[in-house]
Image: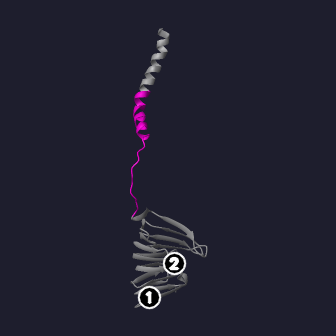
Amino acid sequence: MVAVAKRLLPVAAVGLLAAIALWPEFESAADRGRVAFKRVTQVRADALSVVQPRFQGVDEQNRPYTVTADTAVQAGNEEVVQLHAPKADLLLTDGGWLYLEAREGRFDRPRNHLDLAGRVTIHHDDGTQFVTDAAAIDVAGGHAAGDSPVAAQGPFGTLTAEGFRLRDRGQVVVFTGKSHVVLEGTP
């Protein structure tokens, strides 16, 4: 009898300790098994909001690009997406890259039109930096324009102007209004 008790009592003690340790799991499993039905009236979101959206693609010339933002909000049935802190990265055909950032953005999907505001900055890998307060971009047409003061600096020198027009996907840039350029060259 003592030999049987020597083996049975430790097994019973381990079983009792396991039951005490697992008891909260048994209680919560019973709560998880309950199903409740509620009558819900029609629920509609006022706006669709996405935190840290990321869109990757290639343009019509097979150049890869990435567009990100801190948040993107699309209200109701509108086709307009509000972007907070949008950023874009584009790899150019010659192997260079462009990086664009702004504080706010508004993308009109049907018109394929992007309005940027709040320190719109474009960086090129050759060291050129282009800064303005607002820019309107026709994504499909490859045109951009802005009537806010613009400043640019790079290996060419520095430039200030009252506005700009970009045509032919950046091949032609026209600075409008009073402009001032200081060219730097190598002797």
Question: Which labelled disc corresponds to residue 87?
Answer: none
Where residue 140 appears, x then y in whole percent?
A: 54, 79
Judging from the image, what secondary structure is the residue with disc 1 in? Answer: strand
Residue in the foreground of this view, choosing between 18 and 92: 18
Q: Amino acid at mark 2?
A: Val
Q: Earlier in the sequence, mark 1 or mark 2?
A: 2
* Start-end of magenta stretch: 18-45
Q: Disc count in the image?
A: 2
Question: Which labelled disc corresponds to residue 181?
Answer: 1
Residue 138 lies, with reference to residue 48, above or below; the image says below
Crowd band around label 1 with a 10 angstrom C-alpha radius: few (<14), some (14–19), many (20+): some
Q: Which residue is mark 2?
A: 139
In the shown orientation, is residue 12 left or right of residue 57? left
| CB under 8 Å between discs 1 and 2 | no
Crowd band around label 2 with a 10 angstrom C-alpha radius: few (<14), some (14–19), many (20+): some
Where residue 125 appears, x then y in whole percent?
A: 52, 74
Residue sticking out furthest to the top: 1
Where residue 74 appears, x then y in whole percent?
A: 43, 68
Residue 69: tell me if it is visible.
yes
Judging from the image, what secondary structure is the residue with disc 2 in? Answer: loop
Q: Quadrant of residue 178?
A: bottom left
Residue 112 lies, with reference to residue 21, above or below; the image says below
Identify the residue at horizontal 42%, vertical 90% (top origin).
Answer: 179
Residue 27 drawn in magenta:
yes
Kindly report the distance in space between the C-alpha atoms of the residues bearing marks 1 and 2.
28 Å
Identify the residue at horizontal 46%, vertical 70% (top origin).
Answer: 87
Residue in the foreground of this view, choosing between 38 and 22: 38
Residue 91 drawn in magenta:
no
Q: Amino acid at mark 1?
A: Val
**Viewer-nearest of discs 1 and 2:** 2
Residue 102: tell me if it is visible.
no
